[in-house]
Amino acid sequence: MKLSFFVRDLHLKHTFTIAHQSRDIQDTIIVKLEEDGFYGLGETTTNPFYGMTAENICERLEQARDLVEKGTWSTPEDLWEKGKAIFEDNPFAQCALDMAAWDIFTKKKGQKLYEYLGLDPTRIPVTNFTIGIDSIEKMVAKMKEVDWPLYKIKLGTDHDLDIIRELRKHTSSPFRIDANCAWTVEQAIRNSEELAKLNVEFMEQPLGKDDLEGMKEVYKYSKLPVIADESCIVESDVKKCHGLFHGINVKLVKAGGITPGLRMIQEAKSLGMKTMVGCMTESSVGITAIAHIAPLLDYVDMDGAMLLKEDIAKGVQITPEKVTFPAGNGIGATLIE
């Protein structure tokens, strides 16, 4: 098995702003595994909020080289478990490797990933399209630029309700709102009352990730369902979120890949919680991987490649009507040379 990896810049169509950061370019790291004429691709993006840089991700992947190239692993799950000590504090790097392992493993099996997992590709929820924080005029313009049946609106400003009221004048499509930890308990409960009148489906991560006491109050009094994001990073977080959130948003990059992501989804389901997988502005490599497991989900946020000025890969094609997978086996994404 040969391991290689490299960094690419993903240029965004518009400046993307959320409650705690803005960016025009998103760094991404592509992992490639090669063996016996097959190859697998995986991806992870960088994120300063979590301290994940191109340098420390690549450094950790290099530390895993012997395990990957000389180790005795037979399945992606096996590789993930054997790599836990190496990637303990860098799940972003482990995600890219795990994704590439699933790609090559299922290619060797002669199956698409969703086929191997026994999933029905026609049962995929419609993805939302995300509108980042901006002036109201620019947010309206972004929404008109992409006519979509479901929008996620990033909030965390001093005039959040004004934003939603104004955007609602321009579309009948349902909204999901994501405050990215920016609200207080009082704001979340009060805002939920107004947002419920404005065709908002749910609120994502209204409070800081560790404010579990506050979430007890929001969960009890909110007029809308609440979905955990920053409060649900790894597997051990799922149970902590039960009774505080109505569902979880699993980010494969933050969780460490497809392997733990599948376990998190199953655990949430067993607890009666709604399940969602979100993206971190990946190219079509990472987005295609998400699409393969999307039949398991109640909600999905896989618009990352749609936000790019220019994609570095070809993969799943997403329209409001359907999701079309690439022809090849495995995850099936291919890099654009």
Image (cartoon, rainbow, N blue to C red):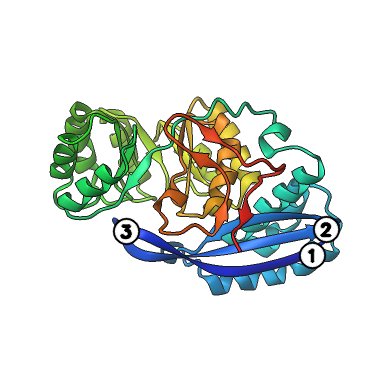
Q: Which residue is mark 2?
A: 35
The answer to whether any part of residue 57 appears in the image is no
Place of residue 258 in the rendered image (x, y in percent of width and height, measured from the top left): 63, 45
Tell me which amino acid carries mark 1. Lys
Residue at image position (56%, 26%) is 122
Tell me which amino acid carries mark 3. His
Q: Which mark is residue 2?
A: 1
Q: Is residue 284 above or below residue 269?
A: below
| Relative depth, front residue between 52 and 291 | 291
Q: Which residue is mark 3?
A: 14
For the residues bearing labels 2 and 1, Cβ distance under 8 angstroms: yes
Q: Is residue 243 left or right of residue 18?
A: right
Q: Nearer the viewer, mark 1 or mark 3?
A: 3
First along the sequence among labels 2 and 3: 3
Number of marks in picture: 3
Q: Residue furthest front?
A: 337
Q: Is residue 68 left or right of residue 188?
A: right
The answer to whether any part of residue 39 appears in the image is yes
First along the sequence among labels 2 and 1: 1
Residue at image position (56%, 36%) is 324
